[in-house]
Image (tube, rainbow, N blue to C red):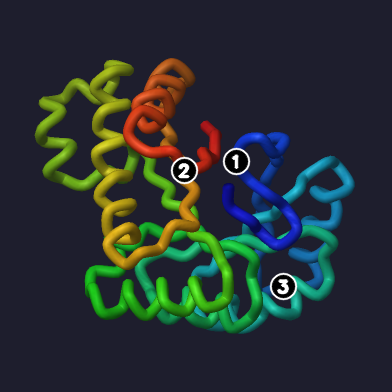
Amino acid sequence: QVRVGPVVIGAPAPVSVQSMTKTDTRDVAATAAQAAALAEAGCDLVRVAVPDMAAAELLGAIKREIPIPLVADIHFDYRLALEAIRQGVAKLRLNPGNLRSPDKVKEVVTAAAGAGIPIRIGVNTGSLPPDIVEKAHGRLHEPEVAARALVESALRHVEILEGLDFPDIVISLKAFDVPATILAYRMMHEQRDYPLHVGI
């Protein structure tokens, strides 16, 4: 199990529902209003994009205005992850392998561990590493090939966190269609026992 603020993810806890705002995160009022509407509609968690430092620095203000845990979606820039942690988000969506430097990954993971913030590793068939795409030989449209590629990519990121003794991991594997997605999650479940974030 992983704890995201008051929400527990992983069996035997009930399935939690998450959605994402479509607003510019730098617009605190609009983002908070949309997050509140999502909560009213039944969401347990809400994710926001963090495209730059200006957005990262406003996460605390958004968090204070919403009734459910805030998840920060981080890509590539470790400084945005560190700022999101300082701002008190409840969870990070992050692929540690995209941060490129082991020292930067360790800094983020150490900060997340110290703050009790879990990390969701999210991979999808549209952004697989080139070597995994090449290994698929143009067959990523086949459910089994796509599923194996997703699992291989995710495990690379998982192993980075495991190597840093960080266990608070959630995994998402998103394919272009439902059969490949289901197959990928079943394959991953055979490899690891982390909670799964299921989405298309």
Q: Residues within 10 Å of mark 3 (few under 14, many from 20)?
A: few
| Mark 2 → mark 1, Cα distance in angstroms | 8 Å
Few, some or many residues within 10 Å of mark 1 (<14, 14–19, 20+)? some
N-term-proximal mark, 1 vs 3: 1
Helix, strand or loop for disc 2: loop
**Disc 1 to disc 3, how far (Cα)?**
32 Å
Residue 194 - label:
2
Task: Name the foreground residue: 200 vs 160.
Answer: 160
> Which numbered tag is attached to residue 75?
none
Question: In terms of depth relative to the viewer, which is nearer, 84 or 106?
Answer: 106
Separation (CA) of disc 2 from disc 3 = 34 Å
Determine the residue positioned at 89% across, 47% down: 40
Q: Give the SS element for disc 3.
A: loop
> Circle 3 is placed at which residue position?
27
Q: Is residue 102 left or right of residue 158?
A: left
**Would you call the spot at circle 2 few (<14 residues within 10 Å), some (14-19), or many (20 or more)?**
some
What amino acid type should be assigned to the residue bearing mark 1?
Answer: Gly
Residue 108 in picture, x, y percent from top left:
41, 75
Residue under pointer 1: 10
- x%, y% of residue 106? 32, 75
Name which of mark 2 and mark 3 comes first in the sequence. 3
Q: Name the amino acid, label 2.
A: Tyr
